[in-house]
Amino acid sequence: MRADAASGRPAAEAGPVFAPRDLEPGHARLVTVEERPFNAETPLAALDQPLTPVELFYVRNHFDVPRLDPAATRLTVDGRVEHALELGLDELRRLPSRTIVTALECAGNGRTTMTPRPPGTPWGWGAVSTGSFTGVPLGIVLERARPLPGAVEVAFTGADRGEVAPGRTVAFERSLPLAVALAPDTLLVHEMNGGALTADHGWPLRLVVPGWYGVASVKWLTRVTVLERPLEAFYQTERYVYEGERGTPERTPVTRMRVRSLIARPADGDDLRAGQVEIAGTAWSGGAAIREVAVTTDCGASWGAANLDPAASPYAHVRWTFRWDATPGEHVLASRASDSSGAIQPLDAVWNVHGYGNNVVQRLRVRVSERADRAAPG
Ligand code: MTE
């Protein structure tokens, strides 16, 4: 991060240092949802592999990508701690690190399938990917800083900021309960899929909270603050909260990803030939291991169990396949996952004001025609 000459503080705190969005090549194959700030979905067909390649990994940015100088970037750890710290990225990399494979899903994924459609970035189904993330357990750093009695939460601040209402500019900030921040799987990440993080995914340093909706995994991380009171911040108490949802206490922050599955192939609207068709997809849950994926090819009249591949980690997606003897006609396909806690995808979307956590069963239509050899006369 650039230093501000007058104050000696990181420039991101002195004012925005936004870069134009041409920092990264290769966006062409993502499905662009918004150009600026850049937001894009993973094409569903790309979910049918163990890791989503970085160039196809969905991107969720609230503001322009901040341009950071890794040589000058420092991570500040402060607040209710015995020893406030400042660590350079090289110092951080010398600490023990771990690699965890996890699905990452935006809480707004599937928002456009809710009725009435909530406001917000119009996500279809593709705001989800699976990556392998390498970094230092945050707990190692927090233990060095020594949280004091009374600490309840840890807040994370990214270097990006922008206007959320006329005259109201905020930094991207989100918090975790102290116990989750200290969990060994909560990582200060500097590598993704075996390479350096890219600008869109939080380079040079981001948080990754496996199993939690993506909003918890703060990108371009510059500050970690231990709090004795729950954080009040735009992206903690006004967005990424369940509001107006039946059965959920008002304004509960989104936490773990709800159980969900998607069909990667065939695609909605595909024309298929009668005969053996392999339906393939992905399932994940932040709550517990995937127990079953049921598939229907007759709009829910009957369901059969898909074959599940082993998951790369408790947080990774599970790939599944289902053999279907496709007969001519129009068919509605759907998959429905459940996890070992008993959670199951709802058949109807559970609506809320901002359209979060919509894990409704995805339905797609395909048309099956006679096989060419049978259709031919004679
Ligand atoms: N961190 C910062 N600093 N700014 C952001 O806009 N978006 C959050 C999270 N971390 C965001 C952020 C949201 S809502 C999601 S879903 C994930 O980053 C997306 O991570 P990705 O773009 O690497 O897929």
Image: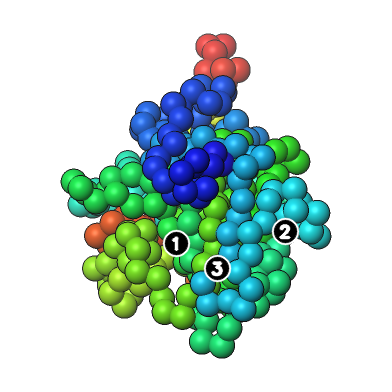
**Kind of residue sitting beneath label 1:** Arg
What residue is disc 1 on? 174
Q: How many marks?
A: 3
Tag 1 and tag 2, C-beta contact below 8 Å: no
- Coordinates of residue 210 in the picture (x, y in percent): 61, 60
**Kind of residue sitting beneath label 3:** Asp
Q: Is residue 218 visible?
A: yes
Q: Is mark 2 within 8 Å of ligand 1?
A: no
What residue is disc 3 on? 78
Task: Look at the numbered disc 1 and give the secondary structure of its residue.
Answer: strand
Q: Classify 32 as above or below 185.
A: above
The quarter in which the N terminus is drawn is top right
- Taking the view exactly as shown, the residue that stands out farthest to the front is 6
Viewed as shown, does residue 92 lie left or right of 114? right
- Coordinates of residue 259 in the picture (x, y in percent): 51, 62
Most foreground residue, 375 or 154: 154
Q: Classify 243 as above or below 55.
A: below
- Coordinates of residue 322 in the picture (x, y in percent): 62, 47
Which residue corresponds to the image point at 67% horizontal and 40% vertical from the top-left? Answer: 71
